[in-house]
Image (cartoon, helix red, strand yellow):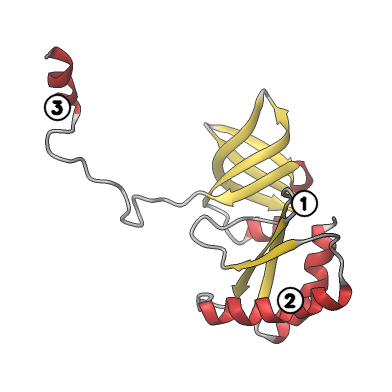
Amino acid sequence: MDVQALAQRVAPALDELGLECLGIEWVPGRGEGLLRLYIDREGEQPVTVDDCEAASREVSALLDVDDPIAGHYVLEVSSPGIDRPLFSAEQFARFIGEEAKVTLKLPRDGRRRLRGRIVAVEGDSIGLEVDGARFDLRHDEMESARLAPDWEALGYTPKPRPGKGAAGRARKRRH
């Protein structure tokens, strides 16, 4: 299935709702696949449950008419979330300076998984700074990519519990 062509097909219907199609993931399964559609709203307003419901109704009706997917599947409409998936070089360009996690289709320098700062986007080439080295990647070399949230800056870093620090562990080992 060509998910990029499908994303282009549903984009005008979502645009009429004031939504943007960020991308589509297809997850095949036994007897039933999962078609996950990521949507966003222009500007600073977050995607709401009502937006997801409206998009689901619109896209479901469109897919019923076009019938581009053979077999049974479940349609899931989602906001991008904090660990936003990145489906294109243009989306990487929106987040220059942020950290991203990338899984490559084929290893580069012995690595398939990279985590680094997005430092440049030129055309379809994305520059990542990973462990002090620069990786220039084409988007079509990537299997998947997501922003890597700074959990500490967001206030989600777990606090150590009393007695559970290194000293607590050392005491447990001695007994």
- Name the residue beneath numbered marker 3: 168
Q: CA distance from mark 2 to mark 3?
A: 54 Å
- Where residue 69 appears, x then y in whole percent? 84, 62
Q: Residue furthest top?
A: 174
- Where residue 7 appears, x then y in whole percent? 78, 66
Identify residue type, mark 2.
Val
- Name the residue beneath numbered marker 1: 124
Q: Quadrant of residue 80?
A: bottom right
Number of the label disc, if any, that sits on residue 59: 2
Residue count near mark 2 (Cα–Cα under 10 Å), binned few <14, some 14–19, many ≥20:
many
- Where residue 94 appears, x then y in whole percent? 61, 62
Q: CA distance from mark 1 to mark 2?
A: 28 Å
Q: Quadrant of residue 164?
A: top left
Decide which of 140, 7 is in the foreground and name it: 7
Kind of element beneath mark 3: helix
Task: Report the side of 96 relative to 142 (left or right).
Answer: left
Which label sits in the foreground, 2 or 3?
Answer: 2
